[in-house]
Image: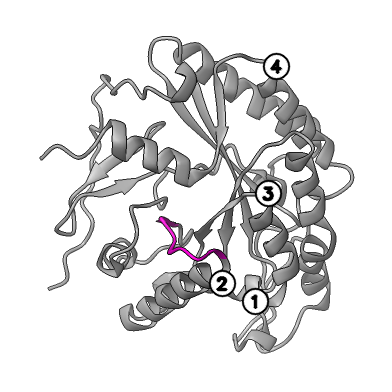
């Protein structure tokens, strides 16, 4: 019988470790650019239906057929949106993390390489942007292996982290077994990294976030305008910054080029970055930076 991940409802039990972020930062902020366009469900990708998730279109999948409107909506992110997101960070000398869907990277390597050259780190986000519950463990393992090879070819190094987004019951075990990953991000259960030994060796988890995430523009009754996104991010940051005076925290913000990369929304990202930069003791960093720091300052203690 295959071992499954354990549940932990206690966590740090109200006594989290002091993160000791560089420069005495109260908050470590990581922006993740989800590089998915081209890797979504599509008949042209060998799928049995069209995509119906995380876009400005509210539609049902077309089984056995293409949805040209959905395809075009995703293409906007690849053709235009990535460049706007990159400019917002580059203008401020900041770096982020790319949640890289492997096939999307193959389909549009130009924008991806521009982000790598700007210093963004790469966190594999599955080879396809699909629900990995639908694949066998063997198929998922091969997808992970392909993602590792891709990142190594692009950067010269194996990836430190992994984020399936829609993981299977096997995902974390397969990530641990791959041998090169320090951490994964398939969790939403804390404001700090933590260690787990579910699968035989210490493995770091950097929780992700779906609330501080522009995917809420593509969800029913979610964000409608950029001001709503800015306000929610600002309020979250303010809370963590206040708490961070005595107990520093981590904040993750998920971005999608086909959503926040639109002209009516990109201003919210610029305002968010400028607001954070107006505060002292804030560390805006890559995901790998957080993982390395935690492994060094808070190593596993069995």
- The residue identified by callout 2 is 102
- The residue identified by callout 4 is 278
Work out how far the residue at label 1 is from the one at label 4, CA to CA, in angstroms: 37 Å
| Residue 161 within the magenta-colored segment of the rendering | yes
Q: Which is more toward the observer, 21 or 170?
A: 21
Please give left or right for residue 30 compared with residue 269 in the image: left
Label 3: few (<14), some (14–19) or many (≥20) C-alpha neighbours in 10 Å: few
Work out how far the residue at label 1 is from the one at label 3, CA to CA, in angstroms: 31 Å
Contact (CB < 8 A) between labels 2 and 1?
A: yes
Quadrant location, the C terminus: top left
- The residue identified by callout 3 is 220
Label 4: few (<14), some (14–19) or many (≥20) C-alpha neighbours in 10 Å: few
- The residue identified by callout 1 is 106
Q: Is residue 235 visible?
A: yes
Contact (CB < 8 A) between labels 4 and 3?
A: no
Q: Is residue 260 visible?
A: no
Residue drawn at x 67%, y 44% is 214
Query: In the image, which residues are magenta?
Result: 155-162
Work out how far the residue at label 2 is from the one at label 1, CA to CA, in angstroms: 6 Å
Residue drawn at x 39%, y 81% is 142
């Amino acid at each position: 019988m295959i071992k499954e991940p354990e549940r932990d409802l206690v966590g740090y039990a109200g006594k989290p470790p002091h993160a000791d972020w560089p420069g005495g930062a109260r908050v470590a902020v990581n922006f993740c650019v989800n590089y998915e366009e081209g890797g979504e469900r599509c008949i042209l990708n060998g799928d049995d239906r069209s995509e119906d998730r995380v876009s400005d279109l509210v539609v049902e999948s077309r089984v056995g057929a293409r949805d040209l409107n959905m395809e075009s909506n995703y293409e906007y992110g690849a053709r235009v949106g990535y460049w706007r997101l990159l400019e917002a960070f580059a203008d401020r000398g900041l770096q982020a993390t790319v949640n890289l869907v492997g096939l999307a990277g193959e389909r549009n390597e130009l924008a991806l390489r521009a982000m790598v050259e700007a210093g963004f780190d790469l966190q594999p986000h599955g080879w396809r942007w699909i629900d990995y519950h639908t694949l066998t463990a063997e198929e998922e393992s091969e997808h992970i292996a392909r993602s590792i090879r891709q990142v190594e070819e692009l950067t010269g190094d194996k990836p430190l982290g992994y984020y399936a987004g829609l993981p299977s019951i096997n995902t974390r075990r397969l990530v641990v077994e791959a041998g090169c990953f320090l951490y994964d991000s398939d969790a939403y259960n804390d404001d700090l990294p933590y260690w787990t030994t579910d699968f035989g060796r210490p493995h770091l988890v950097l929780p992700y976030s779906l609330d501080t995430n522009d995917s809420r523009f593509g969800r029913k009754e979610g964000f409608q305008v950029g001001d709503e996104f800015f306000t929610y991010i600002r309020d979250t940051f303010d809370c963590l910054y206040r708490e961070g005076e005595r107990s520093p925290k981590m904040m993750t913000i998920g971005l999608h080029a086909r959503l926040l990369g639109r002209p009516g929304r990109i201003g919210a990202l610029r305002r968010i970055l400028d607001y954070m930069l107006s505060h002292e003791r804030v560390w805006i960093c890559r995901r790998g930076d957080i993982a390395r720091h935690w492994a060094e300052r808070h190593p596993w203690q069995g």
